[in-house]
Each structure stands twice: as C-alpha cells, then as structure tokens.
Image (cartoon, rainbow, N blue to C red):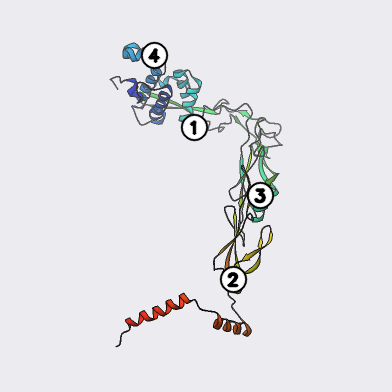
Amino acid sequence: MSEKRDYYEVLGVSKDATEDELKKAFRKKAMENHPDRNPDDPKAAEKFKEASEAYEILSDPQKRSSYDRFGFAGVQSDFSRVNARDFSTISDLFSSLFRDDFMGDDLFSMFFGGRQRRRPTGPQSGSDLLMNYEITFEDAVYGTKKVVDVPIKKECTECNGSGAQKGTSPETCKNCQGSGMETIERQMGFTRYISQQVCSTCRGKGEIVDKPCKGCKGSGRSKENEKIKLDIPPGVDSGFRLRIKSKGEEGRLGGGRGDLYVRLIVESHPFYKRQGDNIIVEILIPFPLAILGGNFTIPTPYGPEKIKIPKKTKEGSILRLQRKGIKRKTSYGMNYGDFLAVIHYEIPERMSEEEKELLEKLKDVMPFSVKQENLFKKLIEDSKQYEVDY
C-alpha cells in the first residue's frame, strides 16, 4: 500500500458518519485484518495498521475537522510510530491506540472470546443449574408440591475449597506467574506476533496443586445431594420452567449461589388428552342411547359429570362441558379450558337370541330414509341402460 488512501474510504463510511458508525466500521476492519487472525496473509498487518490510523484520526473531533479541511497535510498522526509487534500483548496495543478502557478491552474480547483474563481474586457467583423433572397428568392439572434431590457442587469441606490436602497449600504457577494467562510469540519473516491464551500448565487457575485433596481430587468442589422443594402451580404443561432462586451451585470466594431451573415434563395419560387448555376424552355409548338420547355419566379430572346425549347423535360428535378443562393462572387472571367428549357408538360383538329378535323387529318397523330409498331406486334405473347382452 504505497499510495495513502482516504481515511473514510479505508473504513468504508461516508464523510458524515457518526461516532458509533466509525467505531462499528473499525471493529469490522480490525477483526478482518488483525495479524493474529490472518497469519498467512503478509498484507494483514499493513491493512490493520491502515484501519487503525484512519480510526485514530476520525474518532478525534479536532483531528477529523483538520483532516476534512486540509487532508493529510492537516494531520500529523502519531500512529506512524506504532507497530503491533512493539507491545507485549494485543490488549496493550488497543489501550495505547485508543486510551479508552472500554474500547481496548472490548476489541480484545472480540478477538479472543473474553477480556484479558487474570486470576480472580474477588467473589464469584455460582453457576445456574437446569434439570428435567417428570410429573403425572393429574399433578399438572391440580398442581402439587414435591421434594427432589438435586446434585449440587459445593465447597469441599476437607480442603475448604483449596483443592490441596490438609497441611499443604497450592503454589503459584511458575509458567504464568499466577495470572492464569500465558504469552505466545510467533515469528513470521521480519514480523513478531504476540498473543495471549489460557495458561496450559494451570488451565487459568494461576495455581498448581501438588498434592490434591482426596475428597474432591483437587477441584475444591464436591457433589452433594440437596433436597429442594418445588411448588408446581396448576395447569402447567411440558416445557414449563420453575425458577428457584439461590438454589444453584455455590459461588467461590464468598460469591452467592446461582439459580436452579426445573423443566417440567408431563407424562401422557391413558384416558385424557390435552389440547391447549382443553381436555379431550373419547367415550363409547350404546347405540340406542345415540338414537333416543338421554343422560350419560363420564369421568373428568375433577370428578364424574353427567352429560346430555341429544337425540340422533352422530358418530364423532363432540359434546362440551364448559370450564371443566385446565384451570391456569395467568397475568390477566384465571383461565379455564373446556372438557370435550368425542362420542362413538358401541356395537356389541356378541348378542343374545333375545337381542337379535329385537333387532329383527326394529329393522322391520324402523323406516328407511325416504331420500336414501329414492336415490337407490334412481341408481338402479340408471344402471339398466348400461346392460349388454352377449
């Protein structure tokens, strides 16, 4: 890049770009061209430097104004003296360029997945836990209270969380000097690249346990079952999550506990089916009842209920009992589903002689549908015209 390009062109922004637009544009260019992310591109370092120089000028209101009026002659950038290989860490480079803790750390986190790590010295909150828990269909309908055993990692009582045997203590990692991070240097041609990664010796802990605690095997944590009370509200369905505050894993160095999330799984029922807040059941009724009508008692989750079977009820008809389905509390108040009974006829497989005689009499006296009879007669008459004599 022997010829100097316009700073706005370098970042790919217009001349009226805002401060946020400049910052976003530079972040994108920096991520695309940083040498550590492009070790095989000999021009990456030069592109990165070009973008950084453009941002240094345009992010400063006075320098930007001077550049807009007089071009390159109006600015004397200090960036020409800056080279990525002159700094011990990438984070140092960002901090030097922008003198802005947020900007430097934020860019560092984009490249390496987090801020430059140092061994934690303050309280750390415990992790949240997620577990699945099965309940019956009835428990989901009525709501219930349960007590469950939850395996939770707690501070080891034998070593008090140090991970070392009694009478011993962890030693500072010599590889990272207790920082939890190690510096990696790579030489490519005349350019030296420096980056940081989690210490391979202590895995970021900053300490080495020479004689691990037998109780926790050096982790400083041990699993214990803790009894947790669950208050399951009525009307829940599979996938519903309960949040129990401060019942997750214990924190470190005095940090608070995380939360426990319980995802409910409702078992299927052999008789009832759920559709939204409605409960559906399929029932068989005697054929005469479907013709003549009458009352029929059906079981619901809240007890037996009598429903009225209308005369001439057809197969597959649905009878509804309002507000006898799922009862569920919402932010708008109580919500009530319905109970739906799908009607089917029961045709007996075996009949007594008396039943057969009655059906024969019924067949003789029960009138055939006039419309159906006329249709059959018409079809028979129409079919005669297709008769062929061979």
- Is residue 77 something that shows in the picture? no
For mark 1, what is the residue?
A: 113
* Distance from the alpha carbon under mark 2 to that under mark 1: 70 Å
- Dot 4 amino acid type: Lys
Q: Are marks 2 and 3 in contact (CB under 8 Å)?
A: no
Foreground disc of the pair 3, 4: 3
Q: Are marks 3 and 1 in contact (CB under 8 Å)?
A: no
Q: Is residue 210 left or right of residue 111?
A: right
Mark pair 2, 3: CA separation: 35 Å
Q: Residue at x 56, y 82 (%)?
A: 365
The mark closer to the camera, 2 or 4, is 2
As measured in the structure, the alpha-carbon distance from the residue carrying label 3 to the one carrying label 1 is 43 Å
Classed neighbour count for the residue bearing mark 3: other residues with Cα under 10 Å, few (<14), some (14–19), many (≥20):
some
Between 346 and 102, the one lying in front of the other is: 346
Three-letter amino acid code of the residue under disc 1:
Gly
The residue that mark 3 highlights is 234
Q: Amino acid at mark 2?
A: Ala
Q: Comparing marks 2 and 1, which lies closer to the viewer?
A: 2
In the rendered view of the protein, which quadrant contains the C terminus? Answer: bottom left
Mark sitting earlier along the chain (2/3): 3
Mark carried by residue 290: 2
Q: Earlier in the sequence, mark 2 or mark 4?
A: 4
From the viewer's side, name the closer residue of 253 and 159.
253
Q: Nearer the viewer, mark 2 or mark 3?
A: 2
